[in-house]
Amino acid sequence: MTCNVNDVCTFSSTEQDLQKEKEFALLAKALSHPARVRILHILSALEKAGGCLNSDLVSELGLAQSTVSEHLRILKLAGFITAESIPPKMCYRINRECIRQFENLTQSILD
């Protein structure tokens, strides 16, 4: 960014800046619903207790099973969670690397 004596500033983006902004926006979109943030909160608490989520989120969130499944799909697609089949259910965990990536992107955009 450059500014002149009249405090008029111009900003030019590099291709790398644009890519970071796009990646940040995609990850932020995955977190744009309170239920998805709540899911991450629940998973974090379970992880601290040494477990993973393989129970029913429907009652915890108060949403229909199809809605919960869609939220899980979006979080998984963005990389925020992983799913492992432990019959008869799926075991969901937070992908800490994706969380760190999101934190780093946030920091690089705001610096």
Image (cartoon, grey):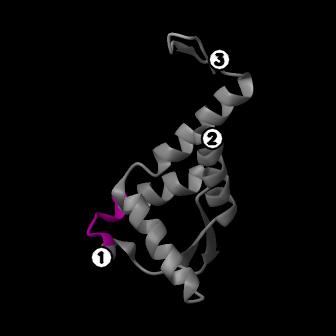
Q: Which comes before the other along the chain, label 1 or label 2?
A: 1
State the residue position of label 2.
111
Residue farthest to the left?
A: 62
Question: How many residues crowd around disc 2 within 10 Å: few (fewer than 14), some, or many (20 or more)?
Answer: few
* Magenta span includes 62: yes
Q: Quarter of the image for the C terminus: give it.
A: top right
Tell me the residue at 28%/64% (across/down).
63
Q: Earlier in the sequence, mark 1 or mark 3?
A: 3
Q: Name the spot of residue 97 as percent of width and height, x first.
A: 70, 61
Q: Is residue 48 above or below residue 28?
A: below
> Is 17 on the left-hand or right-hand side of 58?
right
- Numbered disc 3: secondary structure: loop
Amino acid type, callout 2: Asp
Q: What x and y, as percent, mark residue 41? A: 45, 71
Q: Secondary structure at mark 1?
A: helix
Left/right placement of residue 63 relative to residue 36 reads left
Q: Is residue 105 left or right of residue 59?
A: right
**In screen coordinates, is 3 left or right of 61?**
right
Tags 1 and 2 touching, CB below 8 Å = no
Mark 2 residue element: loop
Q: From mark 2 to mark 3, how far is it between C-alphas? A: 15 Å
Residue flagged by tag 3: what amino acid is it? Ser
For residue 12, the mark is 3
- For the record, the magenta segment spans 61-67
Give me the C-alpha separation between circle 1 and circle 2.
41 Å
**What residue appears at the point 36 percent right and 60 percent down from the top-left corner?**
35
Q: Residues within 10 Å of mark 3 (few under 14, many from 20)?
A: few
The residue beneath circle 1 is: 59
